[in-house]
Amino acid sequence: MAALDQTQVKEGIDQETVDTVREVGGAYKYGWETEIEMEYAPKGLSPDIVRLISEKNEEPEWMTEWRLQAYERWLTKEEPNWAMVDYPEIDFQDQYYYARPKSMEVKPKSLDEVDPKLLETYKKLGIPLKEQMILAGVEGAEDAPAEGRKVAVDAVFDSVSVGTTFQAELKAAGVIFCSISEAIREHPELVKKYLGTVVPVSDNFYATLNSAVFSDGSFVYVPPGVRCPMELSTYFRINAENTGQFERTLIIADKGSYVSYLEGCTAPARDIAQLHAAVVEIIVEEDAEVKYSTVQNWYPGDENGKGGIYNFVTKRADCRGDRSKIMWTQVETGSAVTWKYPSCILRGNESQGEFYSIAIANNYQQADTGTKMVHLGKNTKSRIVSKGISAGHAQNTYRGLVSMHPKAKNARNYTQCDSLLIGNKCGAHTVPYIEVKNNSARVEHEATTSKVDDEQLFYCRSRGMDEEEAVALVVNGFCKDVLQALPMEFAMEAQQLVAISLEGSVG
Amino acid sequence: MALPELKKTATEARLNAMELPEGGCLVDARRAALSRVQTMGLPNRRDEYWKYTRPDTLTQDTAPTAAVFKHDEAPIFGEFDCLKIVFVDGVYDAEASDDFELEGVQISRLSEIDAKDIHWTKDLYGVLEARGQDPVQRPLAALNTAFANDGVAIWVTGKPSKPINLVYNHNSDSSDAMLHHVIRVDAGAEATVLENGPAAARFNKCIEVDIADGGALHMVCAQGRDHERRAATHMFARLRKESVFKSFTLTVNGVLTRNETVVELLGDDAVVHVAGACVGDGDFHHDDTVFITHEGENCESRQVFKKVLRNGATGVFQGKILVKDTAQKTDGYQISQALMLDDDSQFLAKPELEIYADDVACSHGSTSGAIDEEALFYLQSRGVPLNEATDLLTLAFLAEAVDEIGDQDVAETIVSRLENWLIRRH
């Protein structure tokens, strides 16, 4: 890709990683499979499977009970059908709910003991599981302070966490960063106190399912007053066939702390759709700030809409303390079906929620995504910037709620959602809900839909760009607002992804 | 899909309490509509389309009583030269009405259509309503098609010299009225239809409008001031090539109002403007629900809704622009705004876009908030008393909606009514 070739790669940056980033281009690059011996729980869902998952994770009795109760609730719930997505009925008994590499049976004590095949997998994905400076070819990275250039990674492979880097260094700062299964064993008091308090067990069909069968995910606790010394990230990889991934992430930012968390995900290209139902809970206490960034790049299915991941995700942050702050940034390019609404409960006075999203749907992808801003506290502020791009036969929907409760005096919201259509076989939709229950609250909502501006295209082409490059550039301009909000680690990847997903859709 | 038990029982209870008018040429349309109601069931509070407005009192088998409101205001369009057709509690009042003689238009009562077999009405009555049931169900409109006891058929063949004024008087505390009008506008023809009055304790109104190539219809409605009245109205319009449809509704008071407007732009280059101004004080719930479908190329649609709310009033806006893949070069605009004069009121909005064509420009905006303190201060610093300054800013806020009325005299009448409403509250 031209834009990448022009990027100056600074000395000292891993060439290997630069190459990996360079390879992010063309068709879906992560569609390969790791051949590795796996062990599965029997297919289907039952109390026995729930117990088995709990047992595999060596969980205490209270956790098993929690899961079983969730399972009972799930049986009474109906699959939601209000989203503008259309997919064949999911047979929840025809799935594996637990799959782990055989080599993970005995937990590796350190990264050195991890199965080389797994390490190779992450290396190939551009996420080397070693404690190194991870930035590859990102301009300006060299100017960043040394500690800012480190990223700790928790790598989740199907149902288990393979390893977590920089744990010792984080521990020295008081930060707990580990897999959720480890947290349940090692820090039960924290898990008990917070798990299910933001997304209750019975929140919705998929969240309830997740509560029953979640296998792994990340746990973050940042103690009062601590600024997390590095970016934290989790990389989710689905590898096994017919297996759902049900990750669970719990992030607690205690008083006055700060953490930036990144999330990435990919899956092999397969003809049969696979299920992914995650729950992310974030608790933000007084004066704390959490930045949560996602580049969602699950396998989107082929150009005929065959296969792909069904992504049903519940993400919610509870700004409990005064002056707390949460910022969601998401770049959604993958998945056959996306059903995802990262939300902010602005409970503390003067708390702030921000949501920046770019959702790109190509071929037969369907994305129904947006956010909820629930203003409960006084002087709370929220901002929503959502950019949806549809190409091919894709459908892209922004769905959001802004709710100003009677007590949310002087609350403010600004929402802007724009959609871009490339071709006339696709659709772009906007479904905002606005509920204002006090007059000192101010709410503004704007949305526009347009096509790629011909004049801008013509200008680019007259400067010698081919059509595809020109469209990518115009779209990048359109997405600038969102991309700027991404942490530096993702900026380049995100810009690349914009170009990738639009390939072939012009004309 | 079978109806949930609760909905089924409620629907059956309502239908059992009603009798389908028999005979006449509309009987087939009425039967078909009845079966639509049976299939859909009447709305209840669990329906997504009724998320912000509780339909219970609109669907229950007897109408809640509503005191007839006595006031000294003259009828709103009374001073205009128009052809007046009066209904009292949903029943045609021959004495108070003018003769139906007006060049360029043919008017018949629904009861005559039934007896005289006026053919064109059969192509319209219940037809647009039935089309309007997809993708969102509107069972109260189907109920109206089945059971409407009166109404008029207006066939605009030329350019009548004066507007037709439909007056809905309210005389009984317990009246439960259903009116159904059909309006056909021929190619190149143009007319104005005015409507006003509270109509009944509970009013269910359905209007179907079919506008041929190059035709134009202007509608201005002032829903009456009775505090306790309830209304559910539906307007279904179908627009052909280069036709124009403009509708404006003023709502003051009323404990519950749900106005649904459903427009299909079938021909190219058609224009539709739907606007509304509502002012609510106290126990007032007003819901504007609009669904505009663009099918033809190069059409323009505008939705402009302004709500002034206070003392616990609730304003609701559900607007949707659906652009089909054939509707290239669509220009869609939608704005819904609420001005909340105190802390108790609420504004609930769902401004939707659904777009399948790539060469379009659609925008929707929705804002809500209190009166601009700075503007208020500015006016006061220029010697304008607080009350007047508030009124001035409130009127300015409503102006964008009122501006959608083409006829200057009618617009001025509407503004003076709004001024009265504001002054009464000092």
Image (cartoon, coloured by chain):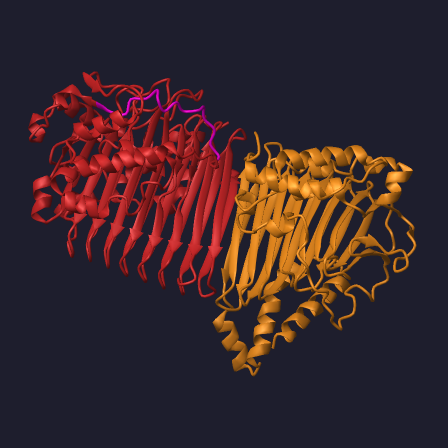
Chain colours: A red, B orange
Between residue A417 and residue B313, name the one nearer to us. B313
Q: Is residue B313 above or below residue A180?
A: below
Q: Is residue A89 magenta?
A: yes
Question: Residue drawn at (76%, 59%), measured in percent from left and top?
Answer: B407
Identity of the residue drawn at 83% across and 41% down: B186
By secondary structure, the bulk of the magenta-drawn segment is best described as loop
Q: Is residue B156 visible?
A: no
A339 and A77: which is toward the camera:
A77
Residue A300 or A402: which is nearer the viewer? A402
Q: Residue B398's spot in the image, x, y percent? A: 62, 63
Q: Give the vertical position of A445 relative to A408 (above or below).
A: above
Q: Does B177 sit above or below residue B142?
A: below
In percent of width and height, residue A503 lies at 41, 27
Q: Position of residue B144 (x, y in %)?
A: 72, 44
Q: Which residues are magenta?
A: A84-99
Q: Quadrant of the N terminus of chain A?
A: top left
* The quarter of the displayed image where residue A118 is located: top left
Q: Give the percent coordinates (x, y) of residue A303.
A: 43, 21
Lateral position of residue A431 relative to residue B224, left or right: left
Residue A446 seen: yes
* Residue that appears at 65% across and 37% down: B133
Along the line of sight, which residue is nearer the eye, A18 or B189?
B189
Q: Quadrant of residue B93?
A: bottom right
On whether residue B123 falls in the magenta region, the answer is no
